[in-house]
Amino acid sequence: MDKRRRAGFRLETSYRFRRHGTRRGRQDARVADSAGLLATLTYGDSATVRITNVGRLRAKDNEPPGYWLDPADGRWMNERDASDASGDSGELPVIDEDGKEKRRKKRVIPFVEDRRNILVVTLDEPLPEPVALTVMYALERGIETAFELEDSELTSELLPPADGPHDRLLFTEAAEGGAGVLRRLQAEPRALAKAARQALAICHFDGDGEDEEGPHPDRPCARGCYECLLTYGNQLHHGVIDRRLIVALLLRLASAEVTSERRGETTTDQHRRLVAASVPAAITSEAAPATSVETEFLTWLREHGLRLPDEAGTTVPEADARPDFVYRMPGVNLAVFLGSADGEEDAARDEEAEERLYLARWDVIRFPEGSDWDAIAAEHARYFGLGPSS
Ligand SMILES: [Zn+2]
């Protein structure tokens, strides 16, 4: 991961939980101490982890995501070739001054996918990046120590957005069907606390959070050292790692208890399911023209200067799915569903339909009832655009 990042690419990680027959592929839990909620945990076994190569780190500000591909020979194009080439592959051939047909180009956003056991830690309070990164590395090391893993068995990273405060940490077991530690963190009341206590010790704090100021009086440690949080693998972040930023949070986690949610349904899920169940069936009806929610969505897009979809009510045969809207963009198709997957009774619109779309190389975005449409669109600006100011 960091190796590729150092190679100059901007990588975005996303994930999707898998459903196993009737069993949900995700399990949730709450992390709380006596002062209240600290985080929620979401565990998924064999979840799909997708790493999207959005572009070069040194891309110009106005460069759209992805890379130019010559659709005729499948080769990546450099800037000069791309600027000489004609537009999208859907257009008529363009002839240059010498009567030769110009090369075509197609914008493609490459990605790789794997199946992994994952744990997403969603912090109740978003943290500035240095704090989020430091606590992430501390927990990774704490988990490895508490459960006697090799450091290659677990990886961690911050999930988007790339800028601004972070509230989601992704932990991934390196092998599918890995050691099962992430599942224990979600399922066992004190497993995370145990890892947090180890993290405190690794960061040179005693059990009360007193700073021992290094592994040994001869080897003082200020922000971090190779005996606590620094590794060759996280060199890119050495400048921001600071163990002193996280002692309060680790202390709270060390005394926190994890409560697993039954059947993977959180109170939020339950609320959404009930809301979804009370929505008129017309929304899921095939023949329905723009219903009120759909109309509202389109109007909202237009009023915010966001990109409008290409199609409405399209059936996607390769995924046996019927999203509300479809965006067809260079290198990627996007399915948009209005309404939550939880409680969705139409097999062409539920969580499994999403999964099939995903496997058919579609992207899927949902706007659940009652969600913050602005926030969702902003998070996916590469599809919806940034509005009139862009
Ligand atoms: Zn240290």
Image (cartoon, rainbow, N blue to C red):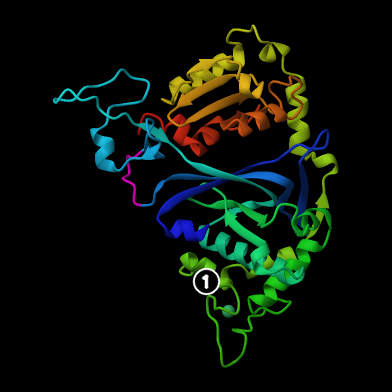
Ligand 1: quadrant of the figure:
bottom right
From this view, report whether residue 277 is shown above or below residue 145: above
State which region is magenta.
Answer: 58-63
Q: Is residue 235 left or right of residue 37?
A: left
- Reply yes or no: does residue 103 show up in magenta: no
Q: Which residue is mark 1?
A: 232
Identify the image quadrant of the C terminus. Answer: top left
Q: Is residue 7 left or right of residue 31?
A: left
Of residue 15 and residue 82, the one placed in the foreground of this image is 82
Q: Secondary structure at mark 1?
A: helix
Residue 140 shows in this picture: yes
Query: Three-letter amino acid code at disc 1?
Result: Tyr
**Residue 241 visible in the displayed image:** no
Image spot of residue 298 (x, y percent): 51, 18
Residue 207, above or below 156: below
Query: In x, y percent, where is residue 18?
Result: 72, 39
